[in-house]
Amino acid sequence: MHNTIAGISEEVLWRKITASIKDGRNVLGRGYQGKTYIFSEGGRQLVLKAPQGRGVAAFIRRRMIANEYAVYTRLSGMEGIPVCHGLLRNRYLVLEFVDGIPIKDARLDDRTFFCNVLLQKIKEMHRAGVAHGDLKKKDNILVVNGRYPILLDFGVAIIRKSGLAPINHFLHNLFRKFDYNAYIKVKYRKRRDRISDDDHQYYQRTLIEKVAGWIKRSYLKGKNILPGS
């Protein structure tokens, strides 16, 4: 019996992804790990994430894909997370396509409702032992039907290990803070002066974020001082 993924022959998916990588077709987007491709097969749409590059870069990206697969396995069945169908030949991550709009481009029917759901999804993810760490990248939150958040791209996410693992636990706690700060950013649109008393518990701006913000502001200021540079 031939192996299948999402009820589709692995051989069919393999031929499609290798042909697309060679010809540059069906590209949906680009990210840290490489490129994502979209395919229609058997009446459904699938997204395949493919690590790119050679040597050390390719090795790191494959590790990120493997980490993302482990995260999807941990979060399997959770609403607000794309359905993961597995790793095609232990290399290409296969996901169900989600018809959503990146939050940077979306119009929310009810921002309070959306943000309340987003907060609950973040908490549920954390209870499962996963911290995303990159939700401030606005392509990583999709909006479905103007109301519901979908969390994407877990390549740098941290799965909390049991037992004595101080570095892992430190990074997991740090990434949890990143996630909550991303929630605050979405809800208040960078207006920290408007954060409610209830939400102050979720806002803990880290040193890393402060430094990154300073670098970004300095860069933008430099662009304004030196137009066209």
Image (cartoon, grey):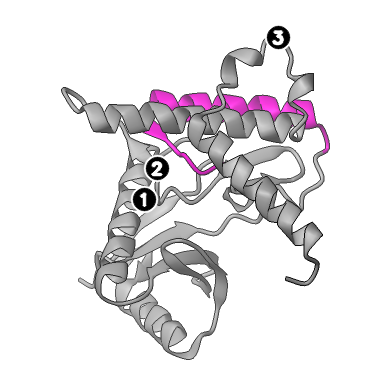
Q: Residue at horizontal 40%, vertical 62%?
A: 94
Residue 79 coordinates in the image, percent (x, y): 53, 36
Q: Name the residue carrying label 1.
A: 68
Horizontal relation, residue 186 to residue 20: left or right: right
Residues at circles 1 and 2 in contact by the CB criterion of under 8 Å: yes
Q: Disc 3 marks which residue?
A: 197
Label 1 element class: helix
Q: Quadrant of residue 158?
A: top left
Mark 2, residue position: 157
Q: Is residue 13 magenta?
A: no
> Disc 1 residue type?
Glu
Q: CA distance from mark 1 to mark 2?
A: 7 Å
Q: Is residue 27 left or right of residue 18?
A: right
What percent of the width, then of the height, locates residue 37? Answer: 50, 72
Helix, strand or loop status at disc 2: loop
Q: What is the magenta range?
A: 109-136
Q: Residue at x 45, y 58 (%)?
A: 95
Residue 21, horizontal then vertical, whole percent? 43, 83
Q: What is the total number of numbered labels drawn onto the structure image?
A: 3
Is 25 placed left or right of 116 in the picture? left
Q: SS for tag 3?
A: loop
Q: Earlier in the sequence, mark 1 or mark 2?
A: 1
Whether residues under marks 3 and 1 lie with C-beta atoms below 8 angstroms apart, the answer is no
